[in-house]
Image (cartoon, coloured by chain):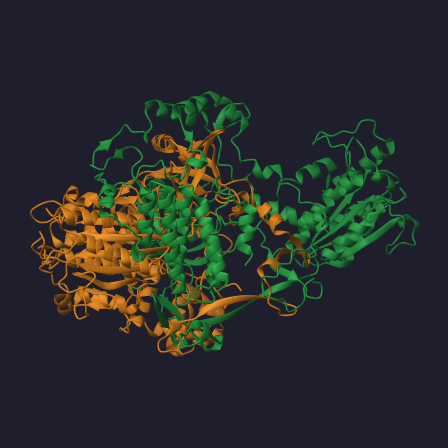
Chain colours: A orange, B green
């Protein structure tokens, strides 16, 4: 019986998401926030800008980050876990233990606010109320009078990871604190903490520190945390040695900037690093190899597929699908070893043994082999088929890989060159030709890395993948018209003249989860989606409106000069505006003059007219469709559907 | 829809075609059939019902055609009428194509028959008509009424292809010495026919040699969006502009045919119908195809219910509602609200803003590419779009736009770049990443090293020194891909896209065709043309030999011997940033026994400090007790992940401490206990998990010190 891991497994997670199965670990991530609660953490930091009064304290900023990350991970990592542990609190809570339990507390002054798990709607709500509801905050966010033992905090985290996230490939503890020296002179407590930190390291837990400077002094990691945090990551020996905390986090003084820099710093670490492949050889020439690891830094994030829910129980439950394979002739259940693969050919099957089939796809061991070099400018814009792959050197197989890689990277960057490479990702993946380009490191305004330095592999199309351009007749625009358009374009530059992905969340993905969240939390449905991808219409009108009108004038002039070809008219450019002043300048679109329209040049006015008379159904399907297309609406369905859709459109106007 | 096609192949199967000529290793007929099979199987592979073909045998022993009473048409047999060819037809044809025992039979008469077949079949309808004649041009041929034939071929616009072994073809440069005078005469007759009706006349050698060049399937362009390129919002602003445009794919990855799943039909299968449990492994199934039945997937649904036996109950598909997961919470969506999570959108290509092309990083390309052209035919739209394209070009800018291809489809952000060719202007379009599409993994800089204390170092073993950088610069420069033009001057070569063919697509297609005709032969190796770009060009390597040698020398890269990987004994214990010796603290703590709730760290630490084998053995013994206890007290599968993690760690540690035997003994014991149900009942699921996690015996491949062979390890896992 083939039992699914997740309900989604058989949707063939895209082939390349498969990681090499050399590890016994489950490829999941568990992330536990440990947020210190103390007087200074709870002290709101006034904003430097007197206009913005804010009550943001370091603790509330940290909780907001946790809340933000929790929501984000529901979308991006639906199978990964997150939890929130508060420490230094007056209250204590650890599973069924609290102040009221009998006996001693195992972890005094540790408050496990959100258990480490895939978050549920309830937990999202709880965390939000801690962030937003002051009463709740006053109840829980009360600092203890006694110093909490860091050893105890670390062991508490250890136990949470051990029991809740066993066998996870990645387990991370995010510590947010402003106390750089928790056990100032108590040597025994310090040593205990370092021992517990080593335990975490040996368990495979990575500790990441998000330090917040206090008003009177900067956070100094050498006082305590340098004994707690390890250089290399225990799970990913290739991971680059320790990265410095982002400089600005430590320097921020006011609440808002603490929040922002924390957000950007935490976001940049929100995803556990997973290599697509490790230690593949990069062949620079015959007998000259170094080793690299590959990472997918760009991957289209899709909403999770719908699933089946069982409503017969106490609360809705997701039904797990189990697939059994049966033979078509007798409907008997079949075992995996019985299955043969065959291709349909000429009404019959042509079959191959599994070994033959594998052999067909095999073109040698995984490798990235440099074939030669070319200038970057020779790489056509259109020569692309999918998202890129990022590679970075690893010393695991070849000592010295990093320096060679660095030399290659610097050369390609300096001379703006690309390497043509023959790239076999996995043994049976099928080779591709790709362009390998160097990408410089980019950092954001908080000094946090946005894009890492390294080489990118951009798969090129084969001849088979290139489609021919459809025929079309060309009218080359004359200079005056181009000049007008140039002015328009110059008016509408994006900030800094570049594309900044972080500024554009995927509107349909966000909306999907926004609605799910509302349904899950039993909230009112939001009315308006926030869609950052919509153009800023008002600005466009303000900045470029006049230029657009004069371009439209010019277009009319130039168009008049073209000898009429083949009698086909045009629909163009300017919409017949409500206001005639502008519409007069640009001729109303004259759609392919259908006889049925009775000579009316403007289909839109025609549709409007029929709408008012209630005779829309007298229009032909072609006219209705044209109209709907011009409004960006669907043209699916029968005539009655089209009429209904047009009515709907005009009614709402 | 592709056009309907009708092709008639005329194959000369005369006795003389069975001979080996000009030092070839195949007979003329076998040689000719290489070409014919390739053409026919390409047609069959399309699976199109409207791609039909017929076959006529020329110089057959018998006579079988509609004019068989006429002596002019003797020794000609219609082997197959015009129809869609399927596998049985291929097999039958394979049986029929054999050298006959005669050299009689007139090629021109066969041509007349072929024309007749096409006329009968296609009538006056729209078909692509084609006749392929392959003959060695031996034997008698009558040149009567040639003009009638030619005019008929022209009238019905039939493509005529005439090929033959050792035909003279000055264009290809082939000329047969001491040609038989009759063959020469016949060749010139056939050439005349071919020339008169604009046909192709060539030598078989050329046709066969061109077979290896993969045929690229042309796909008719289909618009994926027809709508408006908009600037501004025409609903609210009078200054908005709309240009009607169409969008077509520019690149789209060609997919190899995919295999379907089949099983042996039950009446053919060696096993019985009610197959027993999976343990009965049968290895000797009959291996021939043709007796297969397809596999269907049956999906059932389960939910957990603690009161039910096994903790799960099965639910009918009809009793389930649709929904989504929000974290751990199941969100149910009623049928009426089906589209509630869908963002309402209107189809359009809306301009968001413009960017400098030099500020764009090419690696942000997320997808295949498309082109945007003006609506056809619409001169005004073409004019308007042209001004946009030229303006972008002159400003060295790209446009960022929001694309919704159909109403209520999710919006995409795309980048638009101008493309201006002498006869063609368009916008090139590619998808851009959204915020969620970017995973921020962080990596240290490559041109400097930052130490723990925050110092920036520029000389380091991970950074190239000046020598290495210079050697790399020289090597890269010497490996520049250039072409030679007609004058022998070096010129910039374009990226090899047009003559690079998808290896997997063409390999699989070729293998299917080969297997279809020769079911019992091994698959031929991939055509050389498919791997032409798998190695740097030889001439380039030769000219860069010195530079490469120098580079290897100064780079001083050393391969890590496989054994040294992961070996722990020699390694330094990991230390925190401060370099504090935590181990010293640990040994002060005197952890005597491994505590079950902190087992993994304490096990690792015990091994790290073990001074003798007894300590290690004892640690493993303790872990064994802990793991077995976890299994025994596991409610259902509750503890299994912990058990797997524990076993995995023990295994890894013992491999690196070179004590594979300790793990193997432990695992053997565990297996026995699991199978004998001594650890709290039926724990076979755990054993299955263990297999999947590859936690079997440590074999000799993994540790040299192991006494378990790879096969034994495999057998140990499967025998349950």
Q: Position of residue A399 (x, y in %)?
A: 39, 32
Task: Choose between B599 and A305: the one closer to the eye.
Answer: B599
Q: Is residue B226 left or right of residue B598?
A: right
Task: Choose between A348 and A426: the one closer to the eye.
Answer: A426
Confirm whether residue B197 shows in the render: no
Quadrant of the image containing the C terminus of chain B? bottom right
Residue B652 higher or lower than B536, as above or below:
below
Residue under the image location 49 percent in, 73 percent down: A638
Q: Position of residue B517 (x, y in %)?
A: 72, 49
Q: Position of residue B440 (x, y in %)?
A: 31, 48
Task: Choose between A618 and B408: the one closer to the eye.
Answer: B408
Total numbered circles? 0
Quadrant of the image containing the N terminus of chain B? bottom right
Q: Position of residue A281 (x, y in %)?
A: 45, 37
Residue under the image location 11 percent in, 48 percent down: A186
Confirm whether residue A426 shows in the render: yes
Q: Is residue B150 left or right of residue B567?
A: right
Residue A294 higher or lower than B23, as above or below:
below
Residue under the image location 42 percent in, 48 percent down: B651
Q: Is residue A501 left or right of residue A606?
A: left
Residue under the image location 82 percent in, 53 percent down: B78
Residue A330, by quadrant, is bottom right
């Amino acid at each position: 019986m083939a039992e699914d891991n997740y309900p989604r497994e058989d949707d063939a997670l895209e082939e390349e998401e498969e990681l090499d199965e050399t590890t016994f670990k489950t490829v999941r991530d568990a992330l536990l926030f440990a947020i210190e609660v103390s007087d200074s953490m709870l002290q709101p930091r006034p904003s430097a800008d007197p206009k913005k009064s804010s009550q943001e304290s370091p603790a509330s900023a940290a909780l907001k980050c946790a809340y933000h990350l929790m929501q984000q991970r529901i979308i991006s990592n639906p199978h990964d876990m997150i939890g929130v542990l508060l420490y230094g609190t007056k209250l204590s809570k650890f599973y069924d233990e609290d102040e009221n339990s009998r006996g001693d507390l195992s972890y005094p002054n540790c408050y496990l606010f959100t258990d480490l798990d895939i978050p549920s709607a309830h937990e999202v709500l709880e965390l939000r109320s801690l962030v937003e509801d002051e009463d709740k905050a006053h109840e829980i966010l009360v600092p203890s009078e006694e110093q909490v033992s860091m050893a105890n905090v670390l062991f508490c985290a250890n136990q949470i990871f051990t029991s809740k996230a066993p066998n996870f490939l990645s387990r991370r503890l995010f510590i947010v604190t402003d106390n750089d020296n928790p056990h100032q002179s108590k040597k025994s407590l310090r040593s205990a903490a370092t021992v517990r930190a080593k335990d975490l390291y040996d368990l495979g837990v990575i500790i990441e520190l998000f330090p917040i400077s206090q008003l009177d002094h900067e956070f100094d990691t050498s006082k305590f945390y340098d004994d707690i945090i390890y250089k290399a990551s225990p799970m990913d020996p290739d991971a680059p040695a320790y990265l410095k905390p982002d400089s600005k986090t430590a320097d921020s003084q006011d609440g808002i900037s603490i929040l922002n820099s924390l957000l950007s710093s935490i976001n940049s670490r929100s995803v556990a690093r997973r290599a697509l492949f490790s230690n593949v050889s990069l062949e620079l020439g015959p007998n000259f190899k170094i080793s690299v690891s590959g990472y997918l830094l760009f991957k289209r994030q899709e909403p999770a597929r719908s699933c089946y829910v069982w409503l017969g129980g106490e609360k809705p439950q997701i039904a797990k699908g189990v697939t059994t394979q049966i033979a078509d002739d007798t409907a008997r259940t079949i075992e995996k070893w019985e299955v043969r693969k065959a291709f349909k050919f000429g009404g019959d099957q042509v079959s191959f043994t599994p070994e033959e089939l594998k052999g067909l796809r095999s073109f040698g061991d995984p490798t990235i082999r440099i074939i030669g070099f070319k200038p970057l400018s020779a790489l056509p814009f259109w020569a692309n088929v999918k998202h890129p792959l990022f590679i970075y050197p690893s010393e695991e197989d070849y000592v010295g890989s990093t320096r060679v890689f660095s030399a290659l990277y610097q050369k390609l960057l300096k001379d703006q060159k690309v390497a043509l490479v023959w790239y076999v990702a996995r043994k049976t993946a099928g080779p591709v030709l790709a362009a390998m380009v160097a990408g410089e490191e980019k950092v954001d305004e908080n000094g946090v890395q946005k894009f890492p330095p390294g080489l990118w592999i951009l798969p090129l199309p084969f001849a088979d993948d290139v489609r021919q351009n459809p025929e079309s007749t060309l009218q080359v625009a004359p200079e005056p018209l181009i000049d007008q358009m140039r002015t328009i374009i110059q008016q509408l530059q994006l900030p800094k003249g570049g594309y900044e992905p972080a500024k554009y969340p995927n509107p349909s993905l966000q909306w999907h989860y926004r609605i799910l969240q509302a349904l899950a939390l039993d909230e009112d449905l939001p009315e308006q989606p926030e869609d950052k991808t919509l153009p800023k219409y008002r600005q466009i009108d303000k900045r470029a409106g006049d230029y657009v009108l004069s371009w439209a004038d010019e277009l009319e002039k130039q168009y008049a000069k073209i000898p009429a070809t083949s009698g086909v008219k045009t629909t163009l450019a300017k919409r017949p505006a409500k206001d005639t002043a502008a519409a007069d300048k640009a001729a109303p679109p004259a759609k392919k003059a259908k006889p049925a329209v009775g000579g009316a040049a403007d289909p839109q006015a025609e549709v409007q007219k029929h709408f008012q008379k209630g005779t829309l159904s007298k229009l032909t399907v072609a006219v209705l469709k044209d109209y709907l297309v011009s409004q960006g609406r669907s043209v699916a369905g029968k005539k009655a559907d089209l009429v209904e859709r047009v009515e709907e459109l005009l009614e709402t106007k | 829809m592709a056009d309907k096609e009708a092709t008639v192949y005329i194959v000369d199967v005369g006795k003389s075609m069975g001979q080996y000529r000009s030092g070839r290793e195949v007979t003329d007929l076998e040689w000719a059939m290489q070409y014919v099979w390739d053409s026919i199987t390409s047609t069959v592979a399309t699976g199109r019902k409207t791609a039909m073909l017929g076959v006529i045998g020329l110089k057959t022993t018998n006579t079988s055609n509609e004019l068989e009473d006429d002596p002019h048409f003797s020794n000609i047999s219609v082997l197959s009428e015009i129809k869609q060819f399927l596998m049985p037809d291929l097999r039958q044809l394979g049986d029929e194509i054999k050298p006959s025992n005669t050299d009689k039979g007139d090629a021109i008469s066969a041509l007349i028959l072929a024309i007749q077949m096409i006329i009968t079949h296609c009538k006056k309808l729209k078909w692509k008509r084609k006749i392929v004649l392959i003959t060695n041009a031996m034997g008698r041929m009558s040149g009567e009424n040639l003009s009638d034939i030619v005019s008929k071929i022209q009238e019905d616009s039939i493509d005529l292809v005439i090929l033959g072994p050792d035909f003279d073809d000055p264009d290809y440069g082939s000329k047969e010495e001491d040609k038989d005078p009759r063959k020469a005469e016949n060749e010139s007759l056939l050439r005349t026919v071919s020339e008169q009706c604009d046909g192709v006349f060539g030598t078989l050698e050329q046709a066969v040699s061109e077979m290896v060049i993969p045929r690229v399937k042309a796909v008719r362009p289909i618009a994926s969006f027809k709508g408006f390129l908009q600037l501004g919002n025409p609903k609210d602003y009078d200054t908005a502009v709309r240009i009607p445009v169409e969008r077509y794919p520019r690149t789209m990855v060609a997919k190899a045919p995919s295999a379907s799943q089949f099983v042996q039909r039950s009446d053919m299968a060696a096993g019985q119908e009610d197959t027993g449990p999976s343990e009965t492994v049968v290895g000797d199934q009959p291996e021939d195809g043709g007796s297969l039945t397809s596999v269907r997937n049956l999906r059932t649904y389960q939910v957990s219910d603690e009161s039910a036996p096994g903790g799960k109950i099965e639910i009918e598909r009809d009793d389930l509602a649709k929904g989504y997961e929000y974290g751990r919470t199941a969100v149910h969506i009623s049928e009426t609200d089906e589209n509630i999570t869908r963002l309402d959108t209107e189809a359009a290509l809306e301009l968001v803003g413009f960017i400098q092309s030099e500020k764009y990083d090419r690696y942000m390309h997320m997808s295949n590419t498309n082109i945007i052209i003006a609506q056809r035919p619409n001169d005004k739209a073409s004019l308007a779009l042209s001004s946009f394209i030229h303006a972008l070009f002159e400003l060295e800018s790209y446009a960022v736009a929001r694309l919704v291809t159909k109403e209520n489809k999710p919006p995409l952000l795309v980048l638009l770049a101008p493309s201006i060719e002498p006869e063609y202007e368009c916008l090139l379009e590619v998808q851009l990443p959204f915020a969620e599409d970017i995973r921020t993994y962080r990596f240290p800089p490559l041109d400097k090293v930052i130490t723990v204390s925050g110092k920036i170092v520029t000389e380091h073993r991970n950074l190239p020194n000046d020598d290495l950088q210079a050697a790399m610069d020289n090597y890269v420069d010497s490996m520049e891909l250039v072409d030679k033009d007609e004058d022998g001057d070096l010129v910039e070569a374009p990226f090899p896209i047009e003559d690079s063919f998808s290896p997997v697509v063409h390999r699989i297609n070729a293998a299917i065709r080969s297997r279809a005709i020769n079911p019992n032969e091994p698959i031929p190796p991939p055509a050389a043309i498919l791997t032409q770009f798998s190695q740097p060009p030889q001439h380039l390597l030769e000219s860069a030999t010195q530079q490469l040698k120098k580079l290897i020398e100064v780079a001083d890269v050393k391969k890590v011997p496989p054994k040294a990987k992961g070996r722990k004994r020699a390694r330094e214990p990991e230390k925190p940033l401060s370099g504090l010796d935590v181990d010293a603290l640990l040994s002060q703590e005197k952890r005597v026994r491994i505590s079950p709730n902190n087992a993994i760290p304490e096990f690792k630490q015990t091994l790290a400090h073990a001074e003798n084998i007894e300590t290690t053995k004892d640690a493993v013994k303790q872990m064994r007790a802990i793991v077995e206890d976890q299994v025994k007290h596991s409610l259902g599968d509750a503890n299994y992940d912990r058990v797997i993690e524990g076993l995995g760690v023990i295994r890894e540690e013992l491999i690196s401490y070179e004590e594979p035997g300790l793990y193997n003994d432990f695992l053997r014991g565990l297996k026995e206990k699991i199978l004998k149900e001594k650890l709290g009942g039926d724990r076979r699921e755990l054993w299955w998990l263990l297999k999947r996690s590859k936690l079997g015996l440590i074999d000799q491949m993994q540790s040299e010190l192991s006494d378990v062979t790879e096969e034994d390890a495999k057998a140990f896992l499967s025998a349950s």
